[in-house]
Image (spheres, helix red, strand yellow):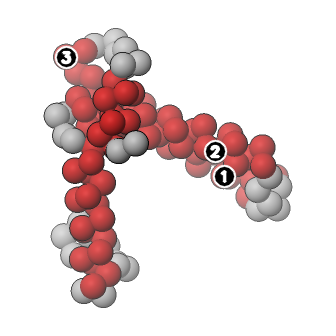
Amino acid sequence: MTFREYQLKAKETAQFPDKENAFIYTALALNGEAGEVAEKIKKIWRDKNKQVSLEDKEAIKKELGDVLWYLSQMAEELGIDFDAVAQTNLDKTHSRLERNLIHGAGDNR
C-alpha cells in the first residue's frame, strides 16, 4: 500500500465536526494522539524500568496508527498528497545527512 492509497482509504472513515475547518481539527487531534504515544512511553520508563512488553508494543502500535490516520487526513484536508509528504521528508533528511547537518536545529539547514 502506498501512502496515497492509505490516505484515500482512511478518508472513507473521516467524520469531522466542522468540515470547513477539518485541517484545524486534524492538527489538534494529531497532537493529542502523539501525546498518547508519549504517555505510554513515559509509563514504560517510569513504571517498567524501560522494559517494553509485547502488550506495550501492541498498545503503542495502535496509537501510532491513530497518529498516522490524523497525519494523513490533515494532508488530505490541505490537498497535499501523502506520498509527496513522505518523499519530501526523505529528500530533506538525506540532504542533511549528505551535508553533515543531520544534527542541529532549524528547518532550513
Q: Position of 31 compared to 24: left or right?
A: right
Work out how far the residue at label 3 is from the one at label 2, CA to CA, in angstroms.
31 Å
Q: Which residue is mark 1?
A: 41
Q: Residue at x 47, y 40 (%)?
A: 67
Q: Mark 2 or mark 1, which is nearer to you?
A: 2
Q: Which residue is mark 2?
A: 60
Q: Position of 44 compared to 87: left or right?
A: right
Q: Residue at x 19, y 16 (%)?
A: 20
Q: Are marks 1 and 3 in contact (CB under 8 Å)?
A: no
Q: Position of 39 compared to 109: left or right?
A: right
Task: Relative to 3, say whether 88 is above or below.
Answer: below
Which residue lies most toward the bottom here? 100
- Label 1 sits on a secondary structure element that is helix
Determine crowd level at label 1: few under 14, some 14-19, many 20+ residues with C-alpha closer than 10 A. some
Work out how far the residue at label 2 is from the one at label 1, CA to CA, in angstroms.
8 Å
Q: Are marks 2 and 1 in contact (CB under 8 Å)?
A: yes
Q: Residue at x 26, y 58 (%)?
A: 87
Q: Position of 44 compared to 15: left or right?
A: right
